[in-house]
Image (spheres, rainbow, N blue to C red):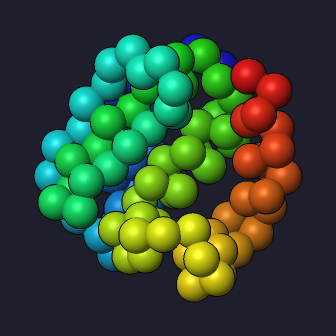
Amino acid sequence: MNASREDLKGTVGQWADRIGVKVREIHLRQMERKWASISMKGRLTLNIDLLNLPEALTEYVIVHELVHLLVPNHGKLFKNFMSAYLPDWEERQDRLKSF
């Protein structure tokens, strides 16, 4: 918990390299209804409240958004990519719902 902005940006960079996608901009701001969003042009917006979540949940949110650069929906292919990169992603998703 209590990651820094630099920690989040570093995690984004590491995962973007691993997944093979390009993030052009990273923004942190207060978001009322979402943990994050990403545009197909690679503009990633992260909810500033991620700084206070456990690292595993923050990582899940980041990977989820980056996989959207490969697959824009939440269909079977999206879930296959999520399972390949984070085998326990469904457990993390469930844990995130409690925050």
Rendered view: 26 above or below 67: above
Question: In the image, residue 77 lies at what x, y percent?
Answer: 57, 84
Tell me which residue sits at (52%, 26%) in the image.
33
The answer to which of 7 and 73 lies nearer the viewer is 73
Total residue callouts: 0
Question: In the image, residue 25 lies at what x, y percent?
Answer: 17, 43
Rendered view: 96 above or below 38: above
Q: Quadrant of residue 90?
A: bottom right
Rendered view: 36 above or below 51: below
The answer to which of 16 and 61 lies nearer the viewer is 61
The answer to which of 99 and 74 lies nearer the viewer is 74
Q: Quadrant of the N terminus?
A: top right
Question: In the image, residue 18 lies at what x, y percent?
Answer: 43, 70
Q: Quadrant of the C terminus?
A: top right
Tell me which residue sits at (51%, 33%) in the image.
35
Q: Quadrant of residue 52?
A: top right
Left or right of residue 82: residue 73? left
